[in-house]
């Protein structure tokens, strides 16, 4: 036997390239927590358990709802996903009682996707902000606790007085400080993502739950 | 005048339950048989397509590179071994070689990806040789880089979708903080290319601060001696040779046992179905002994009786075969899904490939096997003596 060819694990090595071929490619799905078992208690310290739900425009009203959400986003390019792409929602429980939600959305950023999560109480008030993914040297400025706490306590109403295209407005959201002035695209991207996140939650859950 | 087919059909319909049960046996066995034969062909075809989509049949990489792939993923490229670029040029001069393409794979740690950070991988490819080796790659938007040293990137469909990048957008190489402009987004291929970010080789070498490569893709000339080439490449010091023909053989060997077992089951199922046919037709012959006797007294020859009974077998096998193949065609996608779930490695594309030729061959096999099985009852019917049968009935 040729010693060069006699490696004991040669067959496994030979399979390696095809293992890459066979590896599941990242599918076009919604924003999911990388490690929900650790992330949920961090974002919702009083939680004892959570339930993962999937929803999509197709399963919740279809095209009319999609168009309504697009109009509520007021022309901001934010929805890339087709109707049947599932969104992921984490329902948070304390014992048997539901105490809130964690929901994330993808948003186009300067150098890549922004994955923006919020934990919300049952009234739709932000309890915690989590930027799971951001590209750029300024990333740590956006992931810093100081930046995220600025959004705590905000509701969808706080986003109503802000122009997400011009990047100007009034109220609490306008007072949020951009930690990286050199990354205005990502800063506005985060604000747009939060707006989209809260509109989706309102459309699919909060408003729906209030309906008789 | 009533035809032989009509008489045979009427005979079969006299015992409907028995005929239907026999038919179900034939339908199921032909369904299984054609699906498995379709899988046998489809799997190999799909595997060949996956390998062809690689663009090259042989890959040469620095020894240890595969071992350290995991290290590369965990430590962002540390420990990777490299090949001098001139090795690619020397391989290109070999008579078996059609084209070669040098590739540099690099991975960088992105601390802002996820909680503990993540890895971003890049493929440095040579603008002059790589696109020519993969002519089947189609662009969803844009095209290849303009210059061999351009600060540009081409993204696989999934990579672009995941990062929400469009042509004209920027991406940032983590660790190095180098900006690249997206100039092309590939159409979905169903291969690893979908998740890949391609960068000009020279650009990636400049970013990484090295003038070497990690891999050489080799496209072999048609009808060239691949084994001879592989043996020659094994002699290169500190090189690891990965041959896709060997990869294919290894995978085919892995599933060969399963294929033989499943095919055996299909053959056994077919044989059981045929025993059912023999049983049904023989029962029918024994029950009609008296009728057959009368037919003979009226002048029917043993050959006529033989053909009449044989026609019954033909009707059973042909109709069962057609229905079974129809079901196999109708549920081909479901079979595909089930097979895909059961296999440890399933190539992309259609795994259960049933076409008209395969359907016709299977139907012919079922009919021929059926007719052979039906010879005994038909022969037995032909041999019935008219007086004996009439006397025994009385």
Image (spheres, coloured by chain):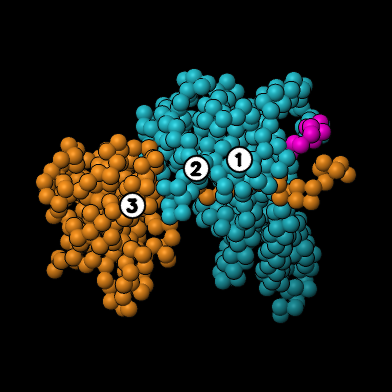
Chain colours: A orange, B cyan
Q: CA distance from mark 2 to mark 1?
A: 24 Å
Identify which residue is drawn at 37% across, 45% down. A139
Q: Residue furthest right?
A: A1
Q: Secondary structure at mark 1?
A: helix
Q: Is residue B350 above or below residue A127?
A: above
Looking at the rendering, which quadrant does residue B328 occupy? Answer: bottom right
Observer-nearest of B16 and B236 = B236
Q: Chain of mark 2?
A: B
Within 10 angstroms of label 2, few (less than 14), some, or many (20 or more) residues?
some
Q: Is residue A168 left or right of residue B78?
A: left
Q: Chain of mark 3?
A: A
Would you say the residues marked 2 and 1 are in contact, meaning their CB atoms lie under 8 Å apart? no
Q: CA distance from mark 2 to mark 3?
A: 22 Å
Same chain assignment for discs 2 and 1: yes
Which residue has dot 2 on it? B120
Q: Residue furthest bottom?
A: B394
Magenta segment range? B232-241
Observer-nearest of B274 and B92 = B92
Q: Chain of mark 1?
A: B
């Amino acid at each position: 036997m040729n010693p060069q060819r006699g490696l004991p694990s040669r067959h496994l090595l030979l399979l390696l390239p095809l293992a890459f071929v066979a590896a599941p490619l990242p599918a076009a799905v919604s924003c999911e927590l990388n490690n929900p078992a650790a992330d949920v208690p961090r974002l919702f310290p009083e939680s004892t358990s959570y339930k993962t739900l999937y929803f999509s425009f197709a399963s919740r009203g279809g095209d009319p709802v999609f168009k309504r959400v697009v109009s509520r986003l007021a022309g901001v390019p934010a929805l890339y996903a087709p109707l049947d792409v599932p969104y992921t929602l984490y329902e948070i429980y304390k014992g048997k009682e539901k105490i809130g939600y964690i929901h994330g959305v993808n948003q186009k950023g300067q150098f890549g996707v922004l994955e923006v999560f919020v934990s919300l109480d049952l009234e739709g008030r932000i309890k915690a902000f989590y930027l799971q993914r951001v590209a750029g040297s300024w990333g740590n400025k956006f992931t810093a606790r100081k930046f995220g706490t600025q959004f705590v306590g905000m509701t969808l109403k706080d986003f109503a007085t802000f122009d997400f295209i011009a990047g100007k407005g009034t109220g609490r959201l306008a007072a949020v400080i951009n930690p990286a002035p050199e990354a205005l695209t990502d800063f506005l991207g985060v604000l747009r993502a939060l707006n989209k996140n809260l509109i989706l939650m309102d459309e699919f859950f909060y408003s729906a739950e209030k309906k008789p | 005048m009533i035809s032989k087919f009509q008489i045979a059909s009427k005979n079969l319909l006299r015992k409907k339950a028995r005929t239907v049960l026999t038919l179900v046996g034939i339908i199921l066995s032909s369904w299984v048989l054609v699906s498995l034969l379709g899988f046998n062909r489809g799997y190999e075809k799909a595997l060949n397509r996956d390998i062809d989509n690689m663009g090259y049949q042989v890959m040469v990489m620095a020894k240890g590179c595969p071992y350290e792939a995991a290290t590369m993923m965990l430590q962002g490229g540390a420990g990777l071994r490299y090949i001098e670029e001139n090795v690619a040029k020397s391989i290109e001069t070999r008579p078996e070689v059609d084209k070669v393409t040098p590739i540099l794979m690099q991975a960088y740690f992105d601390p802002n990806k996820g909680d503990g950070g993540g890895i971003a991988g890049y493929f440095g490819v040579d603008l002059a040789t790589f696109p020519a080796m993969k002519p089947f790659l189609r662009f969803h938007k844009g095209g290849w880089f303009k210059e061999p040293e351009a600060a540009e990137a081409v993204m696989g469909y999934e990579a672009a979708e995941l990062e929400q990048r469009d042509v004209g957008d920027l991406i940032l190489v983590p660790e190095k903080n180098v900006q690249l402009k997206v100039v092309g987004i590939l159409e979905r291929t169903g291969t690893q290319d979908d998740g890949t970010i391609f960068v000009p080789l020279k650009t990636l070498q400049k970013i990484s601060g090295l003038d070497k490569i990690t891999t050489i893709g080799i496209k072999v000339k048609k009808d060239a001696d691949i084994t001879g080439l592989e043996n020659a490449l094994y002699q290169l010091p500190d090189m690891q040779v990965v041959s896709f023909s060997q990869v294919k053989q290894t995978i085919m060997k892995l599933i060969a046992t399963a294929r033989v077992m499943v095919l055996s089951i299909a053959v056994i199922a077919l044989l059981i179905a045929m025993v059912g046919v023999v049983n049904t037709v023989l029962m029918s012959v024994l029950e009609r002994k008296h009728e057959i006797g009368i037919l003979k007294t009226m002048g029917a020859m043993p050959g006529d009786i033989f053909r009449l009974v044989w026609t019954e077998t033909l009707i059973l096998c042909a109709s069962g075969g057609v229905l079974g193949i129809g079901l196999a065609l109708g549920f081909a996608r479901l079979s595909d899904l089930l097979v895909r779930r059961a296999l440890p490695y399933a190539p992309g594309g259609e795994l259960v490939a049933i076409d008209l030729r395969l359907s016709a061959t299977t139907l012919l096999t079922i009919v021929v096997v059926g007719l052979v099985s039906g010879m005994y009852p038909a022969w037995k019917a032909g041999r019935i003596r008219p007086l004996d049968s009439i006397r025994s009935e009385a």
